[in-house]
């Protein structure tokens, strides 16, 4: 059975890809035991490169591997993988559109103990803005495995946003997956909730609570933040009285922004965001404590729905 931990699912999947294709190499920024790239090191030591705490050099070296016909996966905490190496990602990887896979591990607030310096709440916004970059955010470990299977032949660079913790299984067993797909996890007529990452399970919990109040909610898993399927967003948002987006990311530049961008030019219901306000994270003794502090809960999602619907009356 797949582990509920996204990092473990990622490490095991990386090993699986390495067995399937000897072009796969892994580069690490001194965090292999945390990102779980150490699994690949144990299996393929000659295809694993420890770069030290030097994310810029790691990204540039990965570009060289890609130009040589390899498929490099590079690893660090999301805040460092996206921010510290931004210039190299932009100029050495995205401009030439190279097939480098960037694993942003411990994304969002999931590194609860290390505080704002290690919590990446703006990484998806940074990566969305880069031309040619694909941006992924799995909702559970099953989706991690599905995404990894798509990465061998996916053209261009990919940023892969991984939560640090165990997350509930939400992706339907046997459901076909492809990068770019928005997956409908629950159908409903009154409200559409678009979620990503940990907030997908919170959205499903909110939908169940609202059902007891006679409010019918459809829940959509946006695991591909870019390229976003605009037609699917428009279709899933059609005919409802309220639209809510829910993400473990800043409300600036994340899936809320992406959904509203997709809905531009068409008539749609009122939209509200559930996400991290314009602020950095904080330290906490546990992950749930942080999610509660920033109101990234099923109760907050449900209350946001109620507020929007109240405004419709």
Image (cartoon, rainbow, N blue to C red):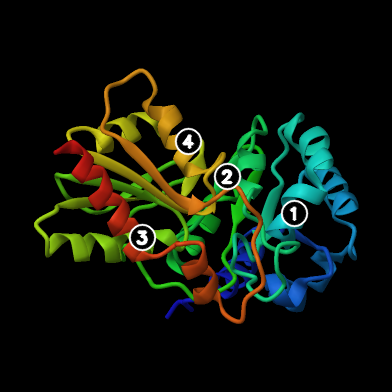
Sequence-first tag of 2 and 4: 2
Give me the disc on residue 300: 3
At 48% from the left and 45% from the top, the residue drawn is 224
For the C terminus, the quadrant is: top left
- Where is residue 91? Give x, y as percent: 82, 33
Whether residue 240 is visible here, answered yes or no, is: no
Secondary structure category for the residue under label 3: helix
Q: Residue furthest top?
A: 265
Q: Nearer the viewer, mark 1 or mark 4?
A: 4
Q: Earlier in the sequence, mark 3 or mark 2?
A: 2
Q: Residue at x 89, y 63 (%)?
A: 53
Residue matched to label 1: 81
Which labelled disc corresponds to residue 135?
2
Residue depicted at 49% across the width and 75% down the height: 288
The span from disc 2 to disc 4 (Cα, nearest Å) is: 12 Å
- x, y percentage for residue 193? 31, 48
Q: CA distance from mark 4 to mark 3?
A: 21 Å
**Front-most of residues 82 and 91:** 82
Mark 4 lies on residue: 258
Is 251 left, or right, of 47 in this rendering?
A: left
> How busy is the neighbourhood of tag 2: few (under 14 within 10 Å), some, or many (20 plus)?
many
- Where residue 227 appears, as percent x and y from the top left, is 51, 35
Query: Mark 4: few, some, or many residues within 10 Å (few <14, many ≥20)?
Result: many
Q: Nearer the viewer, mark 3 or mark 2?
A: 3
Q: Residue furthest left?
A: 214
Query: Do labels 3 and 2 touch, CB within 8 Å?
Result: no
């Amino acid at each position: 059975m797949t582990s509920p931990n996204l990092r473990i699912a990622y490490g095991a999947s990386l090993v699986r890809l390495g067995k399937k294709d000897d072009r796969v190499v892994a580069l690490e920024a001194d965090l292999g035991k945390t990102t779980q790239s150490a699994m690949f090191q144990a299996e393929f030591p000659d295809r694993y490169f420890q770069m030290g705490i030097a994310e810029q050099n790691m990204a540039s070296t990965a570009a060289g591997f890609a130009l040589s016909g390899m498929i490099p996966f590079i690893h660090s905490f999301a805040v460092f993988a996206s921010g510290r190496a931004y210039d190299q990602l932009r100029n050495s990887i995205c401009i030439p559109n190279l097939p480098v896979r960037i694993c942003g591990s411990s994304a969002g607030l999931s590194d609860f103990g290390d505080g704002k310096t290690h919590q990446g709440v703006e990484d998806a916004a940074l990566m969305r803005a880069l031309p040619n970059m694909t941006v992924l955010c799995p909702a559970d470990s099953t989706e991690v495995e599905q995404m990894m299977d798509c990465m061998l032949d996916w053209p261009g660079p990919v940023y892969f946003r991984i939560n640090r913790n165990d997350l509930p299984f939400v992706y339907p067993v046997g459901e076909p997956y492809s990068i770019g797909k928005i997956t409908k996890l629950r159908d409903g007529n009154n409200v559409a909730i678009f979620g990503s990452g940990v907030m997908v399970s919170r959205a499903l919990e909110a939908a169940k609570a609202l059902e007891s109040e006679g409010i019918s909610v459809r829940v959509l898993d946006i695991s591909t933040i870019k390229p976003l399927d605009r037609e699917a967003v428009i279709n899933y948002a059609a005919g409802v009285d309220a639209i809510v987006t829910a993400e473990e990311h800043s409300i600036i530049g994340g899936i809320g922004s992406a959904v509203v961008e997709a809905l531009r030019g068409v008539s749609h219901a009122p939209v509200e965001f559930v996400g991290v306000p314009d602020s950095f994270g904080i330290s906490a003794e546990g992950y749930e404590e942080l999610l509660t502090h920033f109101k990234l809960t099923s109760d907050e999602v449900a209350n946001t729905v109620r507020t929007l619907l109240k405004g419709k009356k």
